[in-house]
Image (cartoon, rainbow, N blue to C red):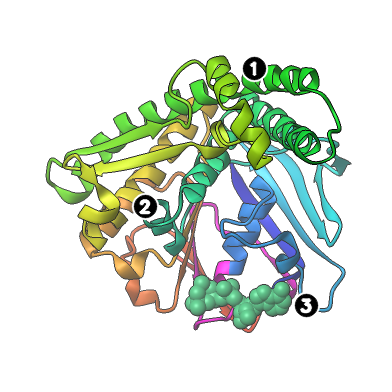
Amino acid sequence: MIITSLQLNNYRCYDALQFKPHKNLNILIGDNGQGKTSILEAIHVLGLSKSHKFSKDEDLIQVGASHANIQAEIDFQGKHTLMNMVISKTGKKAKYNKIEMSKLSDYIGILNLVMFSPEDIDLIKGSPRERRRFLDIDLGQLSKPYMLNLQHYRRLLKERNDVLKGLATKQKYDEVTLDIITDQLIHYAEKIIRTREGFLKQLQEKVQKIVPKLTGDAENINIEYVPSIKTNLKEMYEKKKRLDILLQSTQQGPHRDEVNFLYQNQPMKSFASQGQMRTLVIALKLAVFELIKETKKRLPIILLDDVFSELDKHRQKKILEVFNNTAQVFITTTHIDHINIDTSSSYQTIEIETGKIKGVNHHG
Ligand SMILES: Nc1ncnc2c1ncn2[C@@H]1O[C@H](COP(=O)(O)OP(=O)(O)OP(=O)(O)O)[C@@H](O)[C@H]1O
Ligand SMILES: [Mg+2]
C-alpha cells in the first residue's frame, strides 16, 4: 500500500498541507519543532485512529480550530481508495471512500503501518500500560477478532466496575448481576489472553532472528508474556470477588497483563544498555513489519521518526535493507547527511518549516 496524496487541515501546526509522497522513500527535513513528526503522527492517526504518543485526541487539533482533518489517497496494489479521519472535540469520524464507518473496528487494519519513534524505548523502560498499548495497537491492526474482543472486554470491564461500585456503596445491583457480567467478561478475557500469547510467541521467534542480523552477534533475548491471571479465570474471579467489591474495581484480567523482555535471562529494563534496548525495540518493530507482511499479504507503510540520527551506518543500512525499496517509507531528520541513502535508488526530500512545505525535490 502506498499513500499517493496526503492532506492535513488544522492538524497540530498545519493549517493546510498537501503533497504527493514518493512511492518508496520520503525524507522529511527540518529544524526542531517545525512539524516533521506531526506528519508521521497524522499518518498513524489516519490508519490506526490514535497517535503513537500518549496524546489526547484534542491535542491533535490545531489550537483555535474546531476540528482537524487528515485525508489520503491510497493505492492498494492498483486499487485507489480514499481514507479520511476527522477529529473534533467530541470524537472521531472515519471515512473510507467517502462513506462514514459506523464502527472503527471496520476501519482500523485497512491501512497498515509500522512506526519507529524515539518514544519506543518506553516499551522497555516505561510502565506496563505502554506494553499493553503496543500489544493492542499492533495486534489490533493484525487481527480484527482481537480488536472486537478487546472492545467487548473494555465495555464489560466498565460495566463490571460500575456494578462493583454500586454493590459497595449504594447496595445497588445484586451479586447475580455481577456474576453474569463476570462470566461474559471471562469469555472475552480468555480470547484476548490466547491471542496475546500467540502473538508474543511469534514476535519472539522473529526478534530472535532479527537481532543477530542487526548486531552481528548471537544475542539471548526472550519475550515473556505475564498474564495477570495465570490459572483458571473463573476460579480467580470468584476468589477475588470480595476484594473487587471492597476496592470497587476489577483487580485482575487482561487490563493488568504485563510483558517482560529478557536479555541474557535478566530483565532488560535494569540489565541491558541503552543501545541494546534500542536494538530490541527496532527488532520488535521489524518483527511486526514481517508479521503484517505475512498475515495481510501486503507491505505496511513505514514511519521512521528520528531513529536514524542515533544509529550507526551499519544498522541504518540493515534496517533500510529490510524494506528493500519496496515498502513506502517516511523518514524524518534534521540533517540529510544523518541518513545513509543508497544513491542508486530514487527518493524525495520534503523540506518543512513552521508547518509549511518549503520545497520538494526528487532525486534519482
Ligand atoms: N495542537 C497544536 N496546535 C498548534 N501547534 C501545535 C499543536 N501541537 C503541537 N504544535 C506545534 O507543532 C510544532 C511541530 O511539532 P513536531 O513535533 O511535528 O516537530 P518536529 O519537526 O518533529 O520537531 P523535532 O525535530 O524537535 O522532533 C511544534 O512547534 C509544536 O509546538
Ligand atoms: Mg520530531
Q: Residue 136 placed where, x, y %?
A: 56, 39
- Amino acid type at mark 2: Ile
- Which residue in the structure is indicated by mark 2? 124
Position of residue 346 relative to residue 326, above or below, is below
Disc 1 residue: CB within 8 Å of ligand 1: no
Disc 3 residue: CB within 8 Å of ligand 1: yes
Q: Which of disc 3 and disc 2 is earlier in sequence? A: 3
- Amino acid type at mark 1: His
- Which residue in the structure is indicated by mark 1? 187
Is label 2 in a helix, a strand or a loop? helix
Q: Tell me if I can see residue 216 in this picture.
A: yes
The crowding category of the residue bearing disc 2, from other C-alpha atoms within 10 Å (few below 14, some 14 to 19, many at least 20), is many
Q: Which residues are magenta?
A: 13-37
- Amino acid type at mark 3: Val
Q: Which of disc 1 and disc 2 is earlier in sequence? A: 2
The crowding category of the residue bearing disc 3, from other C-alpha atoms within 10 Å (few below 14, some 14 to 19, many at least 20), is few
- Residue 172: quarter of image: top right
In the rendered image, which quarter contains the N terminus?
A: top right
Q: Residue 170 placed where, x, y %?
A: 85, 39
- Which residue in the structure is indicated by mark 3? 63
Observer-side mark, 3 or 1, equals 1
- 20 within the magenta span: yes
Q: Tell me if I can see residue 358 in this picture.
A: no
Position of residue 333 relative to residue 289, above or below, is below
Contact? badges 3 and 1 (CB < 8 Å): no
- Residue 60: quarter of image: bottom right
Q: Residue 288 placed where, x, y %?
A: 44, 39
